[in-house]
Amino acid sequence: MSFINYASREINCKIVYYGPGLRGKTTNLQYVYQKTAPDAKGKMISLATETERTLFFDFLPLALGEIRGFKTRFHLYTVPGQVFYDASRKLILKGVDGVVFVADSQEERVDANIESLDNLRFNLKEQGYDLDKLPYVIQYNKRDLPGAMTVEEMRLELNPTNVPEYEACATTGEGVFETLKAIAKLILIDLKKGK
Amino acid sequence: MSTQQMVMYEEEFQEITVVIERLLQDANAKVIFLVDKNGQLISGVGDTERFDTTSLASLTAGNIAATGGLAKLIGEKEFSILFHEGEKDNLHISIVGGRVILVVLFDSRSSLGLVRLRVKKSSDELSAIFEKLLKKAEDKEKRGVSDFPFAEITDDDIDNLFS
């Protein structure tokens, strides 16, 4: 839920990166963090296990600049992707303004993608959101790996509603900012409608 | 949308600041923060410069959300007060008006009892202000007035953010 502060002239929005485990959600945030000017970013927080699996969430605050005199800030969160962390995933979706679904392009991961997308839809519904009415984009990550499905095949499985989709390789950064820019834009346009 | 969008106006912001400034004095605290349950910092008073306030807000909200989840598991509605005791500094975290989180950081110059007592009093005042704020937003919505400050936003404006 965006927070508009007239006193400090700020708008804060929350973006959640969702998807199955080991699909590069944290890597997306790490790349954004590395490539953002120091004055535009806050500290990146990762609540992870000893083996660097996300335990609760990663958090990265970004101050992108001003629109009409209002500082525009985006708070980026990832969810823990592993199936048994479902209770934590639900909590992180609270107050979300926009969702990025990070899918794995490898053929053997297709079931995990679909399961996670169903889980996203279900968990949003529990919080009173409808994925089809929320700013939402899909990222097809790991395009560089052998055995990657074609975008057409992935679209058929994961994007029946034809939301904006981006090919990416989060480790090299390809497609990372395109994805972020797309979701930020959708959120601002959604806010503009005065919902 | 499940919850209403949070909007803060100058008038209420001043009122809130007055209440938490007074709480800071009365409770002999070091820092006080008000955080939205979604992790957005609303206001902070005291020695705020020393802290990464954005991270603090996000983690506090995560903490409240996690303990809220625990509460539901054992059949409670929520745990409205959390207390973290450190070697030097302590955190008293409480939920105000069901929606906002009040964080009081204090050391040995104060005590848990004093903080609890003062927080209770301030919470009522803060609840009233947030109630008023919510009503204001609802009234505006009914009248069809948009709270978005830049209804005229263009694609270029958005593109410029990323340039």
Image: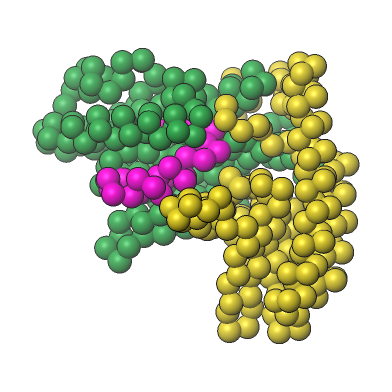
Chain colours: A green, B yellow
Between residue B87 and residue A22, name the one nearer to us.
B87
Question: Is A79 situated above or below A100?
Answer: below
Q: Is residue B110 magenta?
A: no
The magenta stretch is A77-100
The quarter of the image holding the C terminus of chain A is: top right
The residue drawn where x is 71% and y is 48% is: B97
> Which percent across, then down, holds residue A62?
56, 45
> Which percent across, then down, holds residue A135?
49, 25
> Which percent across, then down, holds residue B156?
61, 22
Q: Quadrant of residue A156?
A: top left
Q: Does residue A178 appear to the left or right of A189 in the view shown?
A: left
Asked if one can make out residue A27 in the rendered structure from this viewpoint, the answer is no
Between residue A175 and residue A186, name the one nearer to us.
A186
The residue drawn where x is 76% and y is 27% is: B138
The residue drawn where x is 17% and y is 36% is: A109
Question: Is A82 situated above or below A97?
Answer: below
